[in-house]
């Protein structure tokens, strides 16, 4: 056991006496984890306890609720790094340990390029080797904590890393809880001249949290084992290889023994059921020798059912939706099978790599509650549109389906002016969560403190108090004079940057270092082994599904934009187009390196809703920055697609948006838009 200081021992006593749960950073000191019988070892592998304790939680900021929000559960669509989001969800009693089903289809981390129907590259997953394995392992650990005791998880993966991820999932969920390795189709490639076979399938690993879990047998039409075509049921002899005790059965009132070396296929109870269903007969044309050596005329035969249980071979389904606008979109039929087999109506389903939103769409159609998380704004807008334009039938057919209320959240990208208007109670809680601090009010030498970061004390600076108090050197001097001898080597103060009157990230007083955690954040490299960063948005379709592992957050800072809007004739189009010439695009994100980017280097994409209803942005078209470069930084919009008004969103690589509402009247050869703040 690691040695505990007097201060640590006292704090543990206080926590236990209060009845609160012991923080993980104490638990792994008091109770070191047992060594596993076997595990996958690789560079950069962290301890589970450290992942759970040190992963930074980021508060969820509600942006918009679609539909009337009642007093009960509201489904959640969350933009942010799923690792940080899941850490935050662990603080929600309605979510932690409540998910009955988790389905994830993470980027495969292979470097392979996947193609769309038009032959263009769709994406290339760039994390490789140990880095990808640890990326996914961290998320599996947090997903396990969200899973209910009788819940299950499905993880789709390909042949490059499937064997490693199987070993990792054995570690995280327990090898005894492995249920199936399900074979699923992937994009079909018919390349010639290879020195190996074309790869036709992916794998989905199916694990439970414990041995007891809900599972519903799914059946399909009887098909030929070899050709896959549907076939009519046939009569089969009712015997199977091997001996069983007792061997005899009463069939049509007569005691009968099975053929030598075999046993009757069904129990006595099942035989009676088959007789009542008129699915059992005696074939008198068949003669056999029973286990007693007697020659018997008349073999019992049973009629096969019209349907059969689905096994672990799911190649009867499409692996991906080939005509989808979003890369690697899973078909609804695939998720229907997953959700129907492993959850019930009203239960919670989570997808932490939501992509185009197939899991959420099917969960909604099957009356499940759901949470979807993704780090891409394109995925969020694609899913938002999908949920607001659902059809009742699987495959998105039939009558329209109005979804139950759901709320869009941001995690890690916040609207700071709105946050500053929060009452002190809410602001204090937001500040603590933002820096992954534990909310635990306590007093040291008569000074009220707000919580702990690890084992160090935390004070949330009350910038709202009367008298205009600021956080200056004098404040630190006064604080240290009162508590300096009673706190440890680190003390954290969280404050809005505008209230801090000095530039240092920390101030040393005696043996205590007072760290200032500014909002917005001033990067403190001494505390972290790498810089905080924002989730990067793609500039090319090939980057849509790149894996990201962002740690930190940013505040909404609208980019600086200057454009020209005009009608013009272009060679590629037979008719006139509405052209947007992007003259200036500059991100104003408060992140390291953002200010050094040149003009238009920080542009991710331009998204358009051609028929904006004044309330909800309904994504119609995406123009990636890489394509705009080739087009001289011009966006060409088909005039016939523009309705009464359209919304245009210019997105920077950090997820910040600049929005404009335009009509066709705004496009002419001389119209020019100067940089201004967007219309919301």
Image (spheres, rainbow, N blue to C red):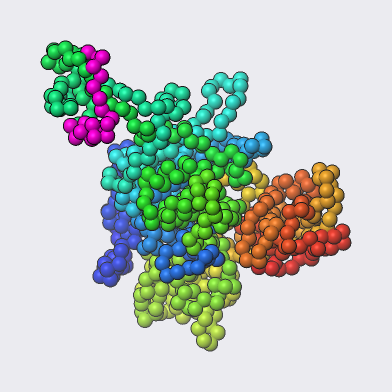
Does residue 269 show up magenta in the picture?
A: yes
In the image, residue 546 above or below residue 529: above
Q: Residue at x 74, y 57 (%)?
A: 642
Query: Residue 142 versus residue 70: which sits nearer the camera?
Result: 70
Relative vertical location of residue 342 with respect to residue 69 in this rendering, above or below: above
Taking depth in this image into account, of 426 and 473 the one nearest to the observer is: 426
Which residue range is magenta in the image? 268-287
Farthest-out residue, right: 670
Q: Nearer the viewer, residue 583 or 305?
A: 305
Give the quarter of the image for residue 436. Answer: bottom left
Relative image position of residue 656 (x, y in whole percent): 63, 60
Residue nearest the viewer, comparing 444 with 134: 134
Q: From the top left corner, tell me how far across and down residue 437 is, in percent.
A: 43, 65
Q: Residue at x 72, y 46 (%)?
A: 627
Confirm whether residue 470 shows in the render: yes
On screen, 265 above or below 327? above
The image position of residue 571, as x and y in percent, is 84, 44
Name the quarter where the C terminus is drawn.
bottom right
């Amino acid at each position: 056991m690691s040695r505990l200081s007097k201060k640590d021992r006292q704090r543990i006593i206080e926590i236990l006496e209060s009845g609160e749960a012991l923080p993980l950073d104490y638990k792994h000191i008091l109770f070191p984890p047992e060594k596993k019988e076997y595990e996958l070892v690789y560079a950069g592998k962290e301890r589970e306890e450290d992942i759970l304790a040190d992963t930074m939680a980021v508060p969820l900021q509600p942006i918009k609720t679609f539909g009337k929000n009642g007093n009960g559960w509201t489904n959640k669509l969350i933009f942010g790094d799923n690792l940080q989001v899941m850490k935050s969800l662990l603080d929600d009693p309605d979510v932690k340990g409540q998910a009955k089903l988790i389905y994830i289809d993470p980027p495969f981390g292979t470097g392979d390029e996947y193609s769309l129907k038009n032959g263009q590259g769709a994406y290339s997953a760039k994390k490789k080797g140990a880095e990808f394995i640890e990326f996914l392992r961290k998320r599996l650990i947090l997903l396990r904590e969200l899973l209910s005791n009788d819940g299950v998880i499905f993880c789709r993966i390909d042949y490059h890393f499937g064997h490693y991820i199987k070993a990792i999932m054995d570690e995280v969920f327990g090898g005894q809880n492995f249920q199936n390795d399900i074979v699923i189709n992937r994009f079909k490639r018919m390349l010639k001249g290879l020195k190996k076979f074309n790869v036709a399938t992916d794998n989905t690993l199916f694990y439970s949290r414990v041995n007891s879990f809900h599972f519903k047998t799914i059946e399909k039409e009887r098909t030929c084992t070899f050709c896959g075509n549907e076939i009519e049921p046939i009569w089969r002899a009712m015997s199977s290889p091997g001996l069983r005790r007792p061997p005899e059965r009463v069939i049509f009132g007569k005691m009968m023994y099975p053929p030598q070396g075999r046993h009757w296929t069904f129990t006595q109870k099942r035989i009676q059921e088959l007789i009542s269903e008129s699915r059992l007969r005696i074939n008198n044309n068949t003669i056999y020798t029973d286990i007693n050596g007697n020659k018997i005329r008349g073999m019992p035969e049973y009629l096969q059912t019209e349907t059969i249980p689905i096994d672990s071979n799911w190649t009867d389904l499409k692996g991906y939706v080939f005509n989808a606008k979003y890369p690697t979109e899973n078909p609804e039929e695939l998720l229907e099978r997953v959700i129907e087999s492993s959850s019930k109506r009203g239960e919670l389903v989570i997808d932490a790599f939501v992509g185009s939103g197939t899991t959420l769409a099917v969960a909604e159609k099957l009356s499940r509650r759901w949470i979807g998380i993704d780090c891409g704004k394109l995925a969020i807008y694609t899913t938002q549109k999908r949920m607001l334009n659902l059809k009742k039938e699987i495959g998105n057919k039939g009558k329209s389906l109005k979804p139950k209320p759901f709320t869009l959240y941001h995690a890690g990208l916040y609207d700071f002016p709105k946050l500053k208007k929060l009452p002190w109670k809410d602001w204090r809680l937001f500040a603590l969560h933002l820096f992954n601090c534990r909310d635990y009010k306590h007093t040291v030498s008569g000074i009220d403190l707000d919580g702990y970061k690890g084992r160090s004390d935390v004070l949330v600076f009350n910038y709202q108090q009367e008298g205009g108090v600021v956080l200056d050197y004098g404040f630190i001097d006064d604080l240290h004079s009162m508590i300096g001898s009673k706190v440890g080597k680190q003390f954290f103060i969280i404050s809005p940057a505008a209230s801090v009157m000095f530039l240092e990230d920390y101030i040393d007083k005696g043996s205590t270092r007072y760290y200032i955690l500014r909002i917005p954040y001033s990067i403190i490299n001494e505390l972290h082994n790498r810089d905080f960063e924002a989730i990067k948005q793609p500039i090319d379709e090939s980057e849509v599904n790149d894996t990201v592992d962002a740690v930190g957050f940013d505040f909404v800072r609208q980019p600086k934009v200057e454009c020209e809007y005009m009608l013009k004739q272009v060679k590629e189009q037979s008719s006139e187009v509405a052209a947007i010439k992007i003259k200036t695009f500059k991100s104003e994100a408060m992140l390291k390196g953002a200010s050094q980017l040149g003009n238009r280097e920080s542009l991710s994409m331009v998204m358009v809703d051609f028929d904006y209803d004044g309330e909800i942005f309904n994504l119609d078209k995406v123009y990636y920055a890489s394509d705009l470069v080739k087009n001289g930084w011009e966006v060409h919009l088909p005039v016939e697609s523009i309705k009464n008004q359209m919304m245009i969103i210019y997105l920077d690589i950090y997820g910040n948006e600049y929005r404009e509402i335009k009509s066709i009247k705004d496009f002419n050869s001389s119209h020019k838009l100067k940089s201004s703040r967007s219309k919301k």
